[in-house]
Every structure is written in structure tokens, then in C-alpha cells.
Image: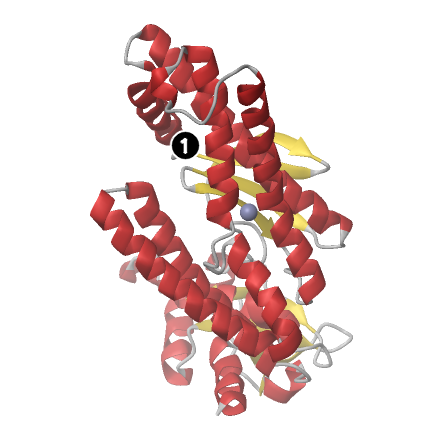
Amino acid sequence: MPRDARRGGSGLTGATVARVQGIPIRVHWTLAIGLPFFAWIMASAYFGLDAQGWAWGAGLAVLLFVSVVAHELAHSLVALRLGTHISEIILLPIGGASIMTDPPRDARREFLIAVVGPITSLLLGAAFLAVSFSSGVGLVNPRSIANFPAFVLTAGYLNVTLGVFNLLPAFPMDGGRVLRAALSKRLGLVRATRVAAGIGRGMALLMGATALLVGNLFLILIAVFVWAGAQTEERSVVMSASLDGVHLEDLMAREPATVAPTASVQEALDIMLASKHLALPVVEGGHPVGLLRAADVAAIPANDRWLRTAGDVALRPIATKRPEEDAASAMAEVLRTGLVAIVDGAGRLLGVVTPTDILRVVQLKTT
Ligand code: ZN
């Protein structure tokens, strides 16, 4: 199913149901609604809405869920083998996603990781269809046959659909990634991503229109996911490509505005307003010890801002980097937290990098 290349975890809330080779498999809470809903769809389509029909429908819902896990595990295990770390597999009603901490940037790895998911689904589908055919059932409407053959046949149909659907060139879905891998040999990563993302957005529009015509809620959600995913990934690739060869010392702001841990939150807010920064490093004896963001300040009632101190409120540890490190290595952290502190060998603050510093370089390099 769609794969997401955001760094770190998915940020989605869910329960861990299993671990395979250290990869947590997490189930998003919306599946508590999604699975019974799918069981109902299957029961009413093929088995009838009596107790037995519901049981078969629920069985198919669980089987589809397991099939999606197999599809994602194929992505994840090949990624692991090729040296790409997977932080988790998350399962949603619209499919699964293997979250990579460091998405592959070379065509061969991307191709192999992307293509193995749909292949797994197609093989699973072929296996179910083979069982179905060998027991004398052809490609018929499952509604016209008894429950068990209908179950096996539908399991086959579902997995084949899963495989074929994911091979659509709807970047960032698997087929779109395969397409980008093929294009990037000729066009380079940035242009290949631009083309694949453009086609992905076109596919998202087609899916959205189809979904509205047939009234399919899942397809609408997938269309939105594809559209947003194409946008986000294109931006992130263009950004990290334009940061190629740029070091943090090239873009950091020297002598940045800082706040002492003993200063009041109100004083920190005044410094933010004066410096027009949305985040400040909390600095003690020249060392950054915390990060205070405008959002943290906003959460404190106005009356308490003179009473609470910056050090008190800035609980989050601050990310630090050395000036000679690649700018791209700090990009995700800067965009996530709003500020990364640049420190010398002794941990003393030399400067800060904020999203504005990164966006400025990206803009200059892409014009
Ligand atoms: Zn996939």
C-alpha cells in the first residue's frame, strides 16, 4: 500500500500488535471502526447478513488485514536487507505504510523496495485463486457459490486488486516509486521526482473524481493521501537536493537571540517579538540547554508569564549539530522543531538554524 517516506515515526497513534525483526507493527485506532465496517461490506456483498454471513465477512476482513501486513513486511524486510532502517509499520483503514527513517535516494534500492510489495500481493492472490480453481470454482461472482469457496475466491480477488492498485503510477504509491526509480536513471532524482509527483497528482484527481462518481469513501481518502504525499515528497526532495554540499555553518545565524533559563516567560516572549523568532535556545553559561517555542509560551496563561521561567517551560531537549555537518542532515529536525543549535566541540552555542535559513538557501538555489 502507500508508503510514506517521512523521517522518524509516523506520528500516528496506535497500538503495537507485533514485532518482526525489531520492526513494530502498529494498528491505528481507526481500524477499530474500519475492520467491522469492512466485515459488514463483505458480509452484505457475498455472504448475507445473518450470523454466519457476518462470521465469513469478519474472516475476510481479518484476512485482508493480514494480507496488507504481508505486503508491508515485504517492503520492510527488503528495505532492511538493503540497509534502510524501518521505524515502524502502521496499519490504517486505507492500507499500510512502512515508515523509513532514511528513505533510499538511489534508483535501484527504491525500485526493489517498492516493487516487492505489489509482487507479494499478486503472489498471494495467485495462490488463493489457484486453490479456488483447483477446487473447480472459476472466475465467478462469489455471491453465486457456497461460503468457503466464496471466501477463498474473494481472498484471491482482494490480493490481486491490492497488487494491481498499488502498481498504479500514483506517486508516492508503489507504482509511482517504481516509475520514479526508472525515470531517475535518465533525469536525475529531482526532475524524476517532479515528473512522478506531477503524474501522481493527476492520478489523485482521477481517483478523487472516480470516488465521487461511485461514492467510495476509501478511494477519496486514498486520493487525498496521494495528492498530499506527492506534494510533500516533491518538496522534501527538492529541498535536500538544493542543500547538497551546503554545510550548517554556511546558513546558520551567528550571535542568535537567546534566553536565560532564569528569565521569565514574558521576557522570553519579548525577546521573540524583538528578534522575530518563533523559537529560542535557552542558554546557560554559553551552553544551549533547552528549546522554548512560541507555542510553549502561548500555552501559558498571560497572568502566569511573569511567574514561570523560561527554563521551567522549555522542557524539550534542544537538538544540536556541529557547524561542519551537512545542512541536509538537520533539515527534518529544523522543520519539525523550528530550531537546531549549532555548537562547538565543547558544546558552546555558535549559532542557530531555523526554517527561514533553510528556505532562503533552497529558494536561492532553485531560482
Ligand atoms: Zn506497498
Please say if 95 is above or below 38. Answer: below
Question: In the drawing, does residue 309 fall left or right of residue 123?
Answer: left
- Residue 58 percent across, percent down from the top left: 41, 18
**Residue at left offset 36%, top offset 59%:** 204
Question: In the drawing, does residue 51 fall left or right of residue 56?
Answer: left
**Residue at left offset 60%, top offset 35%:** 70
Give the labeled residue for mark 1. Answer: 31
**Residue at left offset 38%, top offset 60%:** 203
How crowded pointer 1 is (Cα within 10 Å; few <14, some 14-19, many 20+) is rated as some
Please say if 167 is above or below 241. Answer: above
**Residue at left offset 60%, top offset 79%:** 187
Quarter of the image for residue 16 reads top right
Quarter of the image for residue 30 reads top left
Instruction: Look at the numbered disc 1 and give the secondary structure of its residue.
Output: helix
In the image as oriented, which residue stretches furthest toward the top? 51
16 vs 262, nearest the viewer: 16
Residue 186: tell me if it is visible: yes
- Residue 226 percent across, percent down from the top left: 41, 57
Give the colour scheme of this rendering: secondary structure
Residue type at mark 1: give it.
Leu
Please say if 40 is above or below 203. Answer: above
Please say if 137 is above or below 173. Answer: above
Residue 102: tell me if it is visible: no
237 vs 13, nearest the viewer: 237
- Residue 225 percent across, percent down from the top left: 39, 54
